[in-house]
Image (cartoon, rainbow, N blue to C red):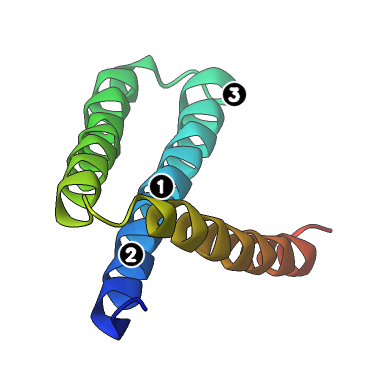
């Protein structure tokens, strides 16, 4: 049997990684709208440096996730799939409400 705290920890790490990935998508949209469409090339280095933070966060979270749940390898995969499914569903709902 798997302790409940391990399940919660796996879900929190997976959710954190998903949030970092979602923030990368948001930075991509900002980069496209501000730099490519509007021609504001001055903000390009700033957005690139800000987008490096979630990339570093993903690396730290994944490393900590692997180290924290070293004996529960099967759990990491199942928790990640569950959180990805829930987050994907929430993203789909938000996009359906926002998109014209």
Give the Cα distance between marks 2 and 3: 40 Å
Pointer 1: what residue?
23
- Asked if the residue at tag 3 contacts the one at tag 2, i.e. Cβ–Cβ closer than 8 Å, the answer is no
Residue at 21% over, 37% down: 53
Question: Up-down: is 55 above or below 26?
Answer: above
- Asked if the residue at tag 1 contacts the one at tag 2, i.e. Cβ–Cβ closer than 8 Å, the answer is no
Pointer 2: what residue?
10
Give the Cα distance between marks 2 and 1: 20 Å
Question: Up-down: is 30 above or below 76?
Answer: above
Q: Nearer the viewer, residue 28 or 40?
A: 28
Question: Up-down: is 55 above or below 42?
Answer: below
The percent coordinates of residue 83 (x first, y second) are 51, 64
Circle nearer the N terminus (2, 3): 2
Total labels drawn: 3
Q: Nearer the viewer, residue 83 or 35?
A: 83
The percent coordinates of residue 35 (x first, y second) are 47, 22
The crowding category of the residue bearing disc 3, from other C-alpha atoms within 10 Å (few below 14, some 14 to 19, many at least 20), is: few
Pointer 3: what residue?
37
Q: In screen coordinates, is 1 left or right of 100?
A: left
The crowding category of the residue bearing disc 2, from other C-alpha atoms within 10 Å (few below 14, some 14 to 19, many at least 20), is: many
* The C terminus lies in quadrant: bottom right
């Amino acid at each position: 049997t798997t302790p409940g705290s391990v399940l919660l920890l796996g879900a929190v790490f997976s959710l954190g990684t998903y949030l970092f990935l979602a923030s990368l998508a948001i930075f991509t949209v900002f980069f496209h709208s501000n730099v490519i469409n509007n021609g504001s090339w001055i903000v390009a280095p700033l957005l690139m440096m800000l987008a490096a933070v979630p990339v570093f966060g993903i690396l730290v979270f994944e490393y900590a996730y692997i180290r924290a749940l070293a004996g529960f390898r099967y759990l990491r995969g199942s928790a990640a799939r569950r959180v990805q499914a829930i987050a994907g569903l929430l993203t789909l709902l938000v996009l359906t409400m926002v998109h014209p």
